[in-house]
Image: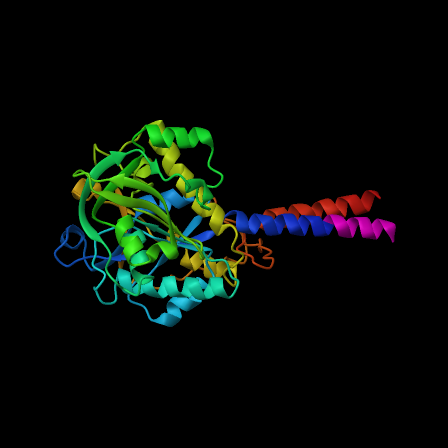
């Protein structure tokens, strides 16, 4: 009996380790954005209706996450279903209008409101907004009241200008003094936007009661604007600059690629992915997950055509469907690194398949220890 109890405890420990492995690589949804009829993409690619800049995918992967594209133009049930399977949402920057029907803003509204519902139900769901994404977060949570002002902040690399109480925030609570020292002394944040939020507007319309402002910056004309925020109640975060560009975009000479700028960008990626790890949601099985991940699509080299993005994932309406996954053959394998037909992955609760190896290792260890006791 003692031998059995020891083995059982070891097995339970292995299961717990496997569960940790599941949430160590969260899946984050990145919202697609509409392609315009007269734009660069439409001139060079047929029937492409939406895109994701590949730098956002790399940005999240570089911090240990995986990415699922979130389609625009879908009904509420699509977003509701997906939001119950992923571990976070990133609203990317870009160039579109908030009044564009069935596009980025409409889809973003569904995602933001569903994230609120989930968090209110006790299901942790973080949302990150970069540049336009930050603006959309604040716009939708202000009942679509426009608070932005015009500003000139394109191609601008500047240091962080923290407010005195910035360490009271969740975002910067554990930031090291060395990283802060680098951020405030060097040009680490890259701005490319024509709209801004100001503290004056926040105070006038009481947005400061729901949003915490952690840093400010000034545009080319000296206009002060808000550059980082977080929601006081929900795990929602926004930055007016582009932390992904110093790491993964090389189309503008104004983008800083110094060690300091890379360190700064990585800090924000690491933070948001660490937030997503707090979510224990998952797809129902490994096949459904595989059909949904960004790996079903290939990025195009678009900067060579004049795009401001090195690479973009481009989607047609047909491609924005769940791809078919071929069944594993009954016997044999292949010569390009594929698995043999006899392998059946063991999926544990919450299982995206990432816990298979820890699970099997723990099971094997348990059997070995039981055999020698």
Query: Which of 296 and 58 lies nearest the eye of the viewer?
Result: 58
- In the figure, 327 relative to 270: above or below? below
Q: Quadrant of the C terminus?
A: top right
In the rendered image, residue 25, in percent from the top left (x then y), is placed at 50, 48
Q: Is residue 120 placed above or below 194 in the rendered structure?
A: below
Determine whether 286 is above or below 177 in the image: below
> Is there any visible trace of residue 138 in the rendered image?
yes
> Can you name the residue that lies furthest to the right here?
1
Which residue sits at x=18%, y=46%? 151
Q: Viewer-proximal residue, 27 or 171?
A: 171
Q: Quadrant of residue 72?
A: bottom left
Q: Is 4 one of the magenta-colored residues?
A: yes
Q: How was the colour assigned to the protein in this rendering?
A: rainbow
The part of the chain drawn in magenta is: 1-10
Q: Look at 41% across and 42% down and name the residue there.
A: 269
Residue 82, visible in the rendered structure: no
Give the image location of residue 186, x and y in percent. Answer: 32, 28
Dominant secondary-structure state across the stretch colored magenta: helix
The picture quadrant where one finds residue 108 is bottom left
The residue nearer to you, when weighing 128 against 186, is 186
């Amino acid at each position: 009996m003692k031998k059995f109890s020891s083995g059982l405890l070891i097995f339970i420990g292995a299961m717990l380790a496997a569960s940790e492995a599941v949430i160590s690589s969260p899946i984050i949804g990145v919202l697609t954005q509409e392609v315009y009829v007269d734009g660069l993409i439409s001139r060079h690619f047929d029937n492409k209706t939406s895109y994701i800049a590949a730098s956002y995918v790399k940005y999240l992967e570089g911090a240990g996450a995986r990415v699922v594209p979130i389609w625009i133009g879908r009904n509420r049930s699509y977003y509701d279903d997906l939001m119950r399977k992923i571990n976070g949402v990133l609203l990317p920057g870009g160039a579109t209008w908030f009044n564009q029907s069935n596009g980025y803003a409409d889809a973003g509204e569904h995602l933001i409101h569903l994230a609120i519902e989930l968090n209110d139900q006790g299901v942790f769901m973080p949302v990150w907004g970069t540049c336009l994404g930050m603006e959309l977060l604040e716009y939708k949570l202000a009942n679509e009241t426009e608070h932005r002002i015009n500003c000139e902040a394109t191609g601008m690399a500047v240091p962080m200008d923290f407010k005195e109480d910035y360490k009271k925030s969740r975002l910067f609570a554990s930031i090291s003094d060395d990283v802060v020292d680098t951020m405030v002394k060097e040009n680490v944040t890259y701005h490319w936007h024509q709209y801004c939020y100001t503290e004056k507007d926040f105070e006038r319309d009481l947005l400061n009661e729901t949003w915490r402002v952690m840093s400010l910056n000034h545009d080319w004309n000296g206009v002060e604007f808000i550059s980082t925020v977080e929601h006081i109640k929900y795990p929602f975060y926004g930055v007016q600059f582009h932390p992904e560009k110093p790491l993964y975009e090389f189309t503008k000479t104004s983008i800083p690629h110094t060690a300091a700028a890379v360190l700064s960008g990585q800090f924000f990626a690491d933070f948001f992915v660490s937030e997503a790890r707090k979510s224990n949601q998952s797809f129902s099985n490994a096949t459904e997950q595989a059909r949904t991940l960004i790996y079903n699509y290939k990025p195009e080299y678009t900067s060579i055509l004049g795009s401001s993005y090195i690479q973009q994932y481009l989607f047609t309406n047909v491609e924005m469907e769940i791809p078919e996954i071929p069944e594993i053959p009954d016997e044999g394998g292949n010569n390009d690194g594929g698995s043999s037909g006899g392998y059946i992955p063991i999926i544990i609760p919450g299982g995206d398949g990432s816990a298979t190896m820890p699970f099997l290792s723990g099971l094997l260890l348990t059997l070995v220890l039981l055999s020698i006791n």
